[in-house]
Structures are given as structure tokens and as C-alpha cells.
């Protein structure tokens, strides 16, 4: 080995195989000692060619494909595709369907944020909190199952409306779940925000400045945690959000200041759980009676879609930020163009400014902090003194836990 | 299920995502959290294939992940089992006509237990692991 190859920076590769959660992505870190000097990443390990398949199917079939773009954001992708097709085909969605869509959309946000909070706690080595948040998340899953018939990949939103109505008998179950969450939120905020360990690990860690957040076009909680006031539900209301009072949640409302760090991202997501509860409550009380779909017969609906010509964009505020579907229909059975821009796509680039200058032990929590819809950290190949060794995700996790212990002393 | 002495340790499970939509991932994690809590029976999700008895494969095996799947499988100690979780790994599911699939999973690896569903419920996943445990026990008994 040539002597200059032994010198820093060392190259560290993480991924693409990740043992516990989420999707594969591959990172390459340039390290100097413990510090990250440069970062690169290669997504695209889960490419399934969904858009290509969509251009060979009709809109009624595509909504089942959009459900499976991401298992966590089933409503988001389906809703945003439906919004685009409805604009092209000039389908008027009944008001009740809009409200049901909003209710499901918010339940999805609750379960997604709780899921994320659990993952974040796990990355910090706080496994009891992971189990606590995932236990309370099951309540939202029960209500989702009650309303849609499935825990994940609901298949409830369709072009022109929704597939199932919310019956009056289902209201008590929803109400019970909401009040449980409102009671719990105080406890969760207390556990996450008043905990000394979490504050030490997350405060001023993985900072994304407001300027970077805007320049890198980040969206959703990642942008809001950096003080950027963006929320499609307030800026470009869709479904029932025009009638509702939704204000973007910014960390300074709760903490009095904005750091743009991992801690602020926790604050924003937890507060959004409470906000979603309020929105659902408001939707339930204001929901008008009426039909739930513009066209009940699928054959007729297909005929309407087949005649449609034009292009449109459907935009939805997903739990991770803005999700966008571009659809072009040329009077054929299937769309001639379909482009999906998922929210994580906008947020991934923010990893680079966040990770530079941080330590190896902080990589898991920073990577998880944008709630990526694809992730990493399984095997790390460290080139140190010319010797190549493989680090497992457990080793990384142990490093993270050790850092937590060190800070507590 | 009757436990005999041939399989005398806890069952450790490793999860491999071969290009899934995350639906099965969430349900696998939901299955190990307090409501279902299979850790009571020694069923545990581990972070490396070298410690695992069973590999849970989710997703339809996209082109880039095929080689990685084979390499991870090769790292597992014998006797080992593969569980295919979710419809897309069994038949391709909604992704059946995609150009980027190397799957279904059983065209890449020998699969022992299939858990259908899109995604399967946590109960179904746990039932699948218990079925795998019975088979693993038999394999272990044959080796002894």
C-alpha cells in the first residue's frame, strides 16, 4: 500500500442493505478521524419502474399501484394522483369525499410521525421509547383499519372520491383514539423534549440553516424545522383543507427559537400529531352529508377518464413534505406521461450540509431525522490504516449508544 | 406445535428489503413491538445475517438488490430458512410486469415459508415465523 493512501480522509461506505427498517440507499463518507468531511449517496436501489407500469394501466388500476409507491404514504400518493386525474377529466369530487380524504390523510400523518418518533428514539439508543411510541401508534392503526379495512395500503381513495363512507357508529372509535392521543401528547412531548439525553444528542446536531433549507428546496417538517413557513395545507389547500384552519407548525412557536437541528425536527413532528388530531375533530364535526364518489360505476368512470385530454399536477402535503404527481392524458385508456416527485426526493440533498462536520455516531440519527423514505446503515466498510474491516449496523448503533452514555456522565 | 429438544435456542430473524414499498417493513417492526411482543418466545430481529436462523425477504427483488440478496443469504449459518413476506415477493403482485424485477423471490433463493398479503398482518408474520420454527427444528433434528 502506498504511504499516501493511509492518510485521512478515510472512505466509509454505508449500505445499501439495512437490517431493520426502510429502504436501501448507499452512502459514501469521507472521514477524518470521527468527523465527516464529505458525503455522497446513491439512491435507486428499490427502483421498480412504477411510472412505466402506470403508463400501461388505466387510472382505476393505477390507484392500487400508487398505494404501493410507499407503504407509509398510501393516501398521499393516491390522493395526489387522483387530484391530477380529476383536474384533467373535470370530475367534481363530492364534498363529503373531500372530508373523508382529509380525515384519512391526517390519520396517516399521525401514524407516520409516531413511527418516525419511535425510529428516532431507537437510533439514539432509547429503545423503551421506541416501544412506547409504537404501542400507542397501534391505536391509530386500529382506527385506520376500522375506516378503510386494511392497516397499510388502504386502497380507499379512488379517482372521483373514496371507496368507503364513515358511518356514525364509527365516530366513537375515532373520538376515543383522538382523546387518547391528546392525553398522550403531553407525555410524549415531556419524554422527548424534557429528556436531558435527547437534548444533548439532538440539540445543535445535524443543523440545516434556513438558507440551505430554501436553496435545497427541502419540504415538509424538514423545512419547517429550519424556520421555513411552508405547508401545502395552508398555502395551496386541497381536499377539505380550504375550509379548515391549518397553520404551519414552526419550532419557534413551541421553543421560542429556531435552531434547524434534529431536536427542532422532533418538536415539529410531535406538535403536528396534535394538530392532526384537531383537524380530524374539525372534519368530523363539519362533514356534510351526501355521496362519497362522483361516479359509482367503475366502467363509467373509466369512460370519463378515457375521454379526458390534458395535463395536470396534483400536490399533497405528505407527512414528509410536498408530494407531486404530474399526469398527462391524451384520450387513451392509460396516461401518456406520469411523473411522481415524492417528498423525500426533495429532502435527500439536505443530508449533505447536515452530515458534514458531524461524528460517525451521529450519522444514524441525522439520516433518520429527515424521515427518509429510504435509508441505510447496515454494513460499513472502514478503510483504516489500509485495513478494510466491516462494521455492522449494530456496531454503529453501539457507537451511538456509547456516545449517549458518555454524555450522561 | 410441539417443541422437542433438537432446537434448543431462541429463533433469531434477519430482515432483508429487496425493493419493497415499506408496507411489509412497518408490519414486521409492528410485529416485534409491545402489542404482539414475540420476544417473549425468543423471536428477535437481529441486525446481521451471521446471527440469524431465518431471513425475512420483503419486496419483489429488484435488479440491483439480487446480488446483495444472494450475498446476504450466503452469510447465514446453516441450518437456515427463508421466509417470503408479502404478495410482491411471491408473485410480483402489482409490480408483476415491471422491467426491473429479478424476482419473485423463489427464483433467486429457495423459499421455505410464504406469507401472503399486501402487506400481511403482524399476526400472519408471527404465524409464519412459528411455522419456520417447526421446520428449522426438524432440520436440526435430522442433522443431529
Image (cartoon, helix red, strand yellow):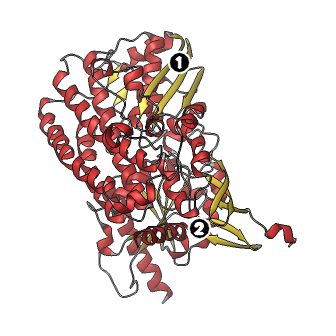
At a point 43% along the width and 43% down the height, the residue shown is A71
**Contact (Cβ within 8 Å) of mark 1 with mark 2:** no
Find residue B76 and report its horizontal and vertical position in percent: 56, 73
Q: Quadrant of the C terminus of chain A?
A: bottom left
Q: Residue under mark 1: which chain is it in?
A: A
Kindly state the secondary structure of the residue where label 2 is placed: helix
Find residue B88 and report its horizontal and vertical position in percent: 49, 47
Q: Which mark is residue A324?
A: none
- In this figure, which residue is indicated by the disc labeled 2? B73
Horizontal relation, residue A376 to residue A165: left or right: right
Q: Residue under mark 2: which chain is it in?
A: B
Relative to B82, residue A216 above or below: above
| Residue toward you, B41 or A352 | A352
Q: Residue furthest front?
A: A256
Kindly state the secondary structure of the residue where label 1 is placed: loop
Q: Quadrant of residue A267?
A: top left
Find residue B79 and report its horizontal and vertical position in percent: 52, 78
Relative to A198, residue A284 above or below: above
Q: Quadrant of residue B70?
A: bottom right
- Dots 1 and 2 on the same chain: no
At a point 77% along the width and 73% down the height, the residue shown is A386
Residue A51 appears in the picture as rendered:
yes
Label 2 crowd (10 A; few <14 / some 14-19 / many >=20): some
At a point 24% along the width and 36% down the height, the residue shown is A277
Relative to A89, residue A237 above or below: below
At a point 42% along the width and 60% down the height, the residue shown is A200
Q: Quadrant of the N terminus of chain A?
A: bottom right
- In this figure, which residue is indicated by the disc labeled 1? A333
Amino acid at each position: 500500500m502506498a504511504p499516501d493512501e493511509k492518510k485521512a480522509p478515510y472512505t466509509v461506505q454505508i449500505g445499501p442493505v439495512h437490517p431493520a427498517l426502510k429502504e436501501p440507499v448507499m452512502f459514501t463518507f469521507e472521514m477524518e478521524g470521527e468527523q465527516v468531511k464529505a458525503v455522497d449517496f446513491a439512491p435507486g436501489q428499490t427502483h421498480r419502474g412504477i411510472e412505466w407500469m402506470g403508463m400501461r394501466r388505466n387510472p382505476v388500476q393505477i390507484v392500487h399501484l400508487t398505494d404501493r409507491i410507499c407503504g407509509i404514504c398510501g393516501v398521499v400518493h393516491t390522493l395526489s394522483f387522483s387530484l391530477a386525474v380529476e383536474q384533467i377529466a373535470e370530475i367534481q369530487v363530492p364534498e363529503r369525499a373531500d372530508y373523508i380524504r382529509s380525515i384519512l390523510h391526517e390519520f396517516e400523518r399521525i401514524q407516520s410521525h409516531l413511527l418516525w418518533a419511535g425510529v428516532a428514539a431507537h437510533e439514539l439508543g432509547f429503545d423503551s421509547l421506541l416501544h412506547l411510541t409504537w404501542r400507542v401508534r397501534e391505536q391509530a392503526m386500529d382506527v385506520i383499519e376500522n375506516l378503510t379495512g386494511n392497516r397499510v395500503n388502504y386502497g380507499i381513495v379512488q379517482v372521483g372520491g373514496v371507496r368507503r363512507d364513515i358511518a356514525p357508529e364509527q365516530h366513537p372509535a375515532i373520538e376515543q383514539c383522538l382523546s387518547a392521543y391528546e392525553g398522550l401528547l403531553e407525555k410524549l412531548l415531556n419524554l422527548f423534549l424534557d429528556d436531558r439525553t435527547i437534548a444533548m444528542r439532538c440539540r445543535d446536531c445535524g443543523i440545516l440553516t434556513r438558507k440551505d433549507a430554501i436553496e435545497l428546496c427541502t419540504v415538509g417538517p424538514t423545512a419547517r424545522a429550519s424556520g421555513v413557513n411552508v405547508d401545502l395545507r395552508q398555502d395551496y389547500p386541497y381536499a377539505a383543507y380550504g375550509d379548515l384552519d391549518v397553520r404551519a407548525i414552526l419550532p419557534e412557536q413551541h421553543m421560542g427559537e429556531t435552531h434547524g437541528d434534529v431536536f427542532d425536527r422532533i418538536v415539529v413532528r410531535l406538535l403536528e400529531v396534535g394538530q392532526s388530531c384537531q383537524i380530524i375533530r374539525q372534519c368530523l364535526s363539519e362533514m356534510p352529508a351526501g355521496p362519497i364518489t362522483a361516479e359509482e360505476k367503475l366502467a363509467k368512470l373509466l369512460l370519463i377518464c378515457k375521454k379526458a385530454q390534458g395535463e395536470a399536477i396534483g400536490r399533497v402535503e405528505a407527512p414528509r413534505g410536498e408530494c407531486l404527481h404530474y399526469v398527462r392524458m391524451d384520450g387513451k385508456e392509460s396516461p401518456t406521461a406520469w411523473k411522481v416527485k415524492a417528498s423525500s426526493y426533495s429532502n435527500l440533498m439536505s443530508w449533505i450540509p447536515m452530515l458534514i462536520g458531524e461524528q460517525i455516531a451521529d450519522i444514524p440519527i441525522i439520516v433518520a431525522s429527515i424521515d427518509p423514505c429510504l435509508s441505510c446503515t447496515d454494513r460499513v466498510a472502514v478503510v483504516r490504516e489500509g485495513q478494510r474491516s466491516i462494521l455492522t449496523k449494530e456496531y454503529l448503533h453501539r457507537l451511538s449508544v456509547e456516545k449517549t452514555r458518555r454524555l450522561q456522565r | 406445535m410441539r417443541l422437542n429438544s433438537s432446537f434448543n435456542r431462541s429463533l433469531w430473524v434477519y430482515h432483508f428489503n429487496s425493493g419493497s414499498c415499506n408496507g411489509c417493513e412497518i408490519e414486521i417492526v409492528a410485529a416485534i413491538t409491545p402489542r404482539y411482543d414475540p420476544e417473549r418466545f425468543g423471536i428477535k430481529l437481529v441486525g446481521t445475517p451471521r446471527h440469524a436462523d431465518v431471513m425475512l425477504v420483503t419486496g419483489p427483488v429488484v435488479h440491483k438488490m439480487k446480488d446483495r440478496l444472494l450475498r446476504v443469504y450466503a452469510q447465514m449459518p446453516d441450518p437456515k430458512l427463508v421466509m417470503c413476506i408479502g404478495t410482491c415477493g411471491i408473485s410480483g403482485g402489482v409490480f408483476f410486469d415491471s422491467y426491473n424485477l429479478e424476482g419473485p423471490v423463489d427464483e433467486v433463493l429457495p423459499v421455505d415459508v410464504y406469507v401472503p398479503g399486501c402487506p400481511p398482518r403482524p399476526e400472519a408474520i408471527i404465524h409464519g415465523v412459528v411455522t419456520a420454527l417447526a421446520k428449522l427444528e426438524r432440520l436440526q433434528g435430522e442433522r443431529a
